[in-house]
Amino acid sequence: MSEDLPTGVERRSFDGESRLATRGEPVYGEPTDEGWRLWDAGRSKLGAMVELGMDAGLAGGDTVLYLGAASGTTVSHVADFAAPTYAVEFAPRPVRDLVGVAEDRRNLFPLLKDARKPETYAHVVESDVDVVVQDVATRGQARVAVENARFLADDGRLVAAIKARSEDVTREPAAVFEDALAALEPTYEVVATERLEPYHEDHLGVVARPR
Amino acid sequence: MTDDTDRDPGGSGAGAAPNGWFEGDAAGGADRIREGRADAPADWPALAVESGFADDESDYYARLREATIGAAREAAAERERADDQQLVHAVRAMDDLDQRANELAERVAEWAGSRYPDAATGVDYARELAGRDPDSTVDERLVSLAQRVAGLADEADELRAFVERETPEVAPNLAAMAGPVLAARLISLAGGLDALAKKPAGTVQVLGAEDSLFAHLRGHAPSPKHGVIFTHEYVRGTRPGKRGSAARALAGKLTIAARVDRYSGERKPELDAELDERIAQIRGGEAE
């Protein structure tokens, strides 16, 4: 397994097991060790991708646009090691928690916006971000990635977790993933894909760079 | 409903010079986060410093943080407050319209029966009649009445489409499991999503069956097995001997779905799958 962890992400021992951790204010009752918070790959798709050794293009200190931030579980870890982190979430209920997470961090900017309509937050999110992280549970996930390519720097990365069940619960996940990758193709060059089992069922981790 | 992102579909100001959230009225930062638009991002931190809005980059981010937190908090509170109550009004109005349209369609049918040998009944017949050319003063009144029926029925259809579109936004899991209209009815009967999420499954099971419930509590009737959830295929489509079990299982999962919608808001398709499995079990099971 490659161990090119972003600066600010470390392996620490929790209950005798070596696990990912970031440094910051605890958010959701996660275990901590000397200020390091356990980043549980089973609760975070990005965490699973890092755990599985995918190169997400995160170095530490990056500018990040995070789509589908939900209550802020994963984005709180991202903001621990990244620089400005823009967190987009469309459902009002989780945004309430996300705001709480942002209050404890200086570099996390919560946005109650629809990731399918980037023109509604392009006046806030800066250009040339290093990484777009995407974890949206809506149909049309590939289209969301394509629409948001406008924010990425030329050498930036899309890091997406595609959820098969959000596209079509009845179809074979492999077929759903194939369609999603094909839809990304004109806009992105896919550099790595990996199924996120055993951490997340029926999810495909995708790393891609803009064409 | 109050959807910040849809307020200005034309995209005012887009295409011209870059238009960051910090431009214009300095006091309205949070509002501009919520309502502004731009087609493309730009190097906002640098532009903000250049324009004098911020002293330096870290000052910019501090202001951005304050404005985004304020905007997200306000917008979330507004939408949470508003949306389920709008749905309650819409579904109640829809039911009122359906009921009135049916009542008046009966009146139209009765009247038409006295005049035309081919007269039929129902809203569909009223719609047909509404398209006719009246050739007497009596027909004028009858056709006009039929037009009112058609108008009421049209408005009910529009409201149904609205409910079908909006319920999944307000309660994604409940809408997926119950269907949007039944989900909206449950929210309406409870008085809101918050109230529904606080009800025990046994109460959700008999929502809409209050008359029989109170008859039962007065001691002269059996306890009702189901309320409005009877309209769900999983209850109605289950053979009578098993309907109580099906209603109980459905109400249990609907209650969980309402709580997930109220307290997390994230869609969980696995809930639907668990219910499907349980119903298959109940329908297949012979012993009990």
Image (cartoon, coloured by chain):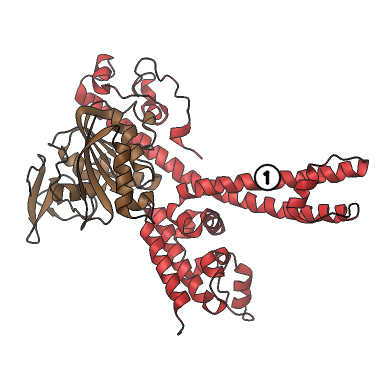
Chain colours: A brown, B red
Residue B121 lies, in percent from the top left, at 79, 56
Residue B288 lies, in percent from the top left, at 46, 84
Give the left or right position of residue B25, taking residue B45 as reference: right
Q: Residue at x 68, y 53 (%)?
A: B98
Q: Is residue B246 above or below residue A153?
A: below
In terms of image quadrants, where is residue A110? Answer: top left
Chain letter of mark 1 equals: B
Residue B156 lies, in percent from the top left, at 65, 48
Q: Residue at x 39, y 63 (%)?
A: B273
Q: Is residue A187 visible?
A: yes
Q: For the residue labelled by badge 1, is the local secondary structure a helix, a strand or a loop?
A: helix
Give the left or right position of residue B95, taking residue B287 as reference: right
Residue B105 lies, in percent from the top left, at 77, 53
Q: Residue at x 38, y 61 (%)?
A: B271
Numbered-mark total: 1
Give the left or right position of residue A123, taking residue B120 as reference: left
* Near-viewer residue (B260 or A186): A186
Q: Is residue A71 visible?
A: no
Q: Is residue B68 above or below residue B165?
A: above
| Mark 1 surroundings: few (<14), some (14-19) or many (≥20) residues within 10 A | some
Task: Kindly identify which residue carries mark 1.
Answer: B154
* Near-viewer residue (B275 or A125): B275
What is the three-letter code of the residue carrying label 1? Answer: Asp
